[in-house]
Image (cartoon, helix red, strand yellow):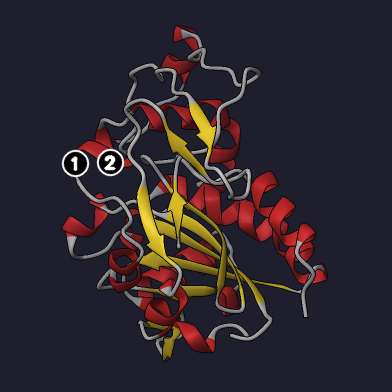
């Protein structure tokens, strides 16, 4: 069997109203942020029979992707780097038998929205630690770019990793391209987080952007593993379309850790 990666489930209480024009105009984002100002269109999702409620499939235009059950074995062989520049395989980042891990793949270290996500993850790290959950944040870029984010945000170095060749992103089938980066309606979510974005980017530097500029077209995603079992998988639809932390906490709290 395979698990489906899908956008978040929309309920009747989910607001699809785009922020006011005044609010949009009060935020001035640089072009490399890749935020679309198109309104979010309504999408319906239904639960996949026999699967967890968080796994869904689109009934309209949303695209889904299949993640094979052995994805942890494939991902485990991928070699990335610590922020200090040491090579490490994914399989060595958490206990492959019973360990719980949240793997958050950022876009790239120079993405302001990813600084906001990293700040949110940092604030949640104590909660992850108390639940016995390993936080693993991965970004596109070289270790020196990761260090810039870690020093200026700041962010704990022992939870930050660099994937300059986007190997993990390719294995997990995360989105890539101009359309996803600059024109996806899901990116409008960032306007509701303007204050958090401004706070997170107070010490932002564009020098954290990868030297390979094609890397800025990469989108991220969030995955939760217990050992080699994939419990949660979500691909970011567009820039700033991050997984809801409440969903992550719900999974981490419901499944007993070793």
Give the quarter of the figure containing the C terminus.
Answer: bottom right
Image x and y of residue 52, in percent: 62, 49
In the figure, 108 relative to 229: above or below?
above
The one nearer the camera, 27 or 10, is: 10
User: Is residue 77 visible in the rendered structure shown here?
Assistant: yes
Regarding residue 108, the answer to whether it shows in the image is no
In x, y percent, where is residue 14? 60, 21
Which residue of the protein is positioned furthest toward the right in this rendering? 130
Q: Disc count in the image?
A: 2
Secondary element at image label 1: helix
Q: Position of residue 15 (x, y in %)?
A: 58, 17
Q: In percent of the image, x 73 and y 65: which residue is there?
A: 128
90 sits to left or right of 183: right
Could you classify mark 2 by the number of other residues whose Cα lies within 10 Å: few (under 14), some (14-19), or many (20 or more)? many
Q: Which mark is residue 130?
A: none
Across and down, in percent, residue 235 comes to 42, 50
Answer left or right for 257 relative to 175: right
Query: Which residue does the image show at 63% across and 51% down from the upper left?
Result: 120
Q: Nearer the viewer, residue 12 or 170?
A: 12
Closest to the observer: 226 or 209? 226
Q: In this picture, is 170 found above or below 244?
A: below
Kindly identify which residue carries mark 1. 178
Looking at the image, residue 175 sits to the left or right of residue 251; the answer is left
Q: Is residue 176 left or right of residue 158?
A: left
Q: Residue at x 27, y 40 (%)?
A: 180
Q: Quadrant of residue 59?
A: top left
Circle 1/circle 2 CB separation < 8 Å: yes
How far is mark 1 from mark 2, CA to CA? 5 Å
Callout 1 environment at 10 Å: few (<14), some (14 to 19), or many (20+)? some
Q: Which residue is mark 2?
A: 181
Helix, strand, or loop for circle 2?
helix
């Amino acid at each position: 069997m395979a698990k489906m990666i899908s956008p978040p489930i929309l309920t009747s209480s989910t607001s699809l109203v785009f922020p006011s024009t005044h609010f949009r105009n009060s935020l001035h984002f640089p072009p490399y942020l890749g935020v679309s100002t198109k309104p979010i269109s309504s999408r319906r999702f239904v639960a996949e029979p026999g699967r967890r409620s968080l796994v869904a499939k689109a009934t309209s235009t949303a695209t889904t992707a299949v993640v094979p059950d052995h994805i942890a074995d494939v991902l485990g062989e991928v070699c990335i780097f610590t922020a200090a520049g040491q090579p490490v395989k994914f399989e060595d980042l958490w206990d492959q038998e019973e360990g719980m891990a949240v793997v958050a793949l950022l876009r790239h270290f120079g993405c302001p929205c990813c600084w906001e996500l990293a700040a949110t993850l940092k604030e949640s790290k104590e909660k992850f630690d108390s639940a016995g959950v390993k936080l693993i944040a991965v970004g596109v870029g070289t270790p020196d770019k990761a260090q810039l984010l870690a020093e200026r945000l700041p962010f704990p170095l022992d939870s930050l990793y660099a994937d300059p060749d986007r190997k993990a992103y390719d294995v997990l089938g995360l989105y890539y391209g101009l359309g996803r980066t600059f024109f996806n309606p899901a990116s409008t979510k960032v306007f509701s987080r303007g204050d958090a974005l401004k706070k997170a980017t107070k010490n932002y530097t564009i020098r954290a952007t990868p030297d390979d500029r094609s890397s800025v077209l990469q989108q991220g995603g969030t995955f939760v593993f217990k050992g080699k079992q994939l419990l949660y998988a979500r691909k970011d639809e567009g820039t700033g379309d991050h997984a809801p932390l409440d969903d992550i906490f719900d999974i981490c709290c419901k499944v007993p850790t070793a």
